[in-house]
Image: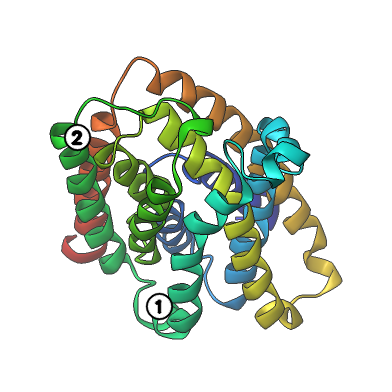
Amino acid sequence: MSETLIAIIIGIVEGITEFLPISSTGHMILVGSLLGFEGEKASVFEVFIQLGAILSVLILYRQTFFNLFRPRKLQGGGFTIWHISAGILPVLVVGFLLHKPIKTYLFSPLTVIIGLIAGAILMLAAEKFSGRPMTRQLDEISIRQATIVGLFQMLSLWPGFSRSGSTIAGGLFFGLSRKAAADFSFVIAVPLMFAACLYDLLKIWHTLSMADLSMFATGFVVAFFVAYLSIVWFLGFLNKSTLAAFAYYRFVVAGLSYYYFFVR
């Protein structure tokens, strides 16, 4: 299979899964294994195309990011950079401290399968046991809620768990509507993913050559456009439905993956 086709396939997978509660990391590991696209180059590619997905959020939520630096916001009114800081600090600290063991021991089909199942159970529990949402807009989120969602986000360090799945579920447990939880999840993804991508790229960038530029550019562009469409669709979906469908999808993927990698 050509590198261009691999770039398109993985770019589509990244774009669809990055912001849906189904685990982009898990899908990338599984698809990479299926395509035989593994190793250092694959790791750099998968990190790099996440920047395309991040760009789609910056464009969709550009007004939210612009508003963060208006005088009223800097003085503490509504949704501020302090909410973002509270949402990303726990996972940044733990991710930095455990980066090596996570990359060494948790990036495999079996750990992804476990994460898919555990994340699905969490999402179903959030839908079943969360009360009536009291916070329906991004500007209404409290620092306490932002911190709690940030703590739930640490679950996403386990591949297959899903960053958006863990944060949206955490938001539901503590009074956020699905829309508010999703908006917060997407906004805090930008600085978090950018920092994580930059950290990973600086460690392994030396393995690339100019010959890889075309493949990386293709994956970046595909991931950007697909992620943009995926976010728009997902926000519309949450207005009229629950996370249950994604949880059941995760069970199916986990079962099929287990059969493919460990039974057949």
Taking the image as drawn, is residue 10 in sight?
Answer: no
Where is mark 2, residue-wise? 130
Give residue 245's position: percent from left, percent from top.
Answer: 26, 29
Q: Is residue 72 visible?
A: yes
Observer-nearest of 44 and 154: 154
Question: For mark 1, does the 10 Å Cα neighbourhood hold few (<14), some (14 to 19), or many (20 or more) residues?
Answer: some
Task: Give the amino acid type for the residue marked by disc 2 in the picture.
Answer: Ser
**N-terminal label among 1 and 2:** 1
- Vertical placement of residue 254 versus 102, above or below: above
Q: Quadrant for residue 242, please give it.
A: top left
Residue position marked by numbered label 1 in the rendering: 102
Residue at 39% x, 57% y: name it.
Answer: 153
**Residues at discs 1 and 2 in contact (Cβ within 8 Å):** no
Say which of 39 and 165 sits in front: 165
Residue 119 screen position, x and y as percent = 25, 51
Residue plotted at (18% across, 38% down): 124
Q: Quadrant of the C terminus?
A: bottom left
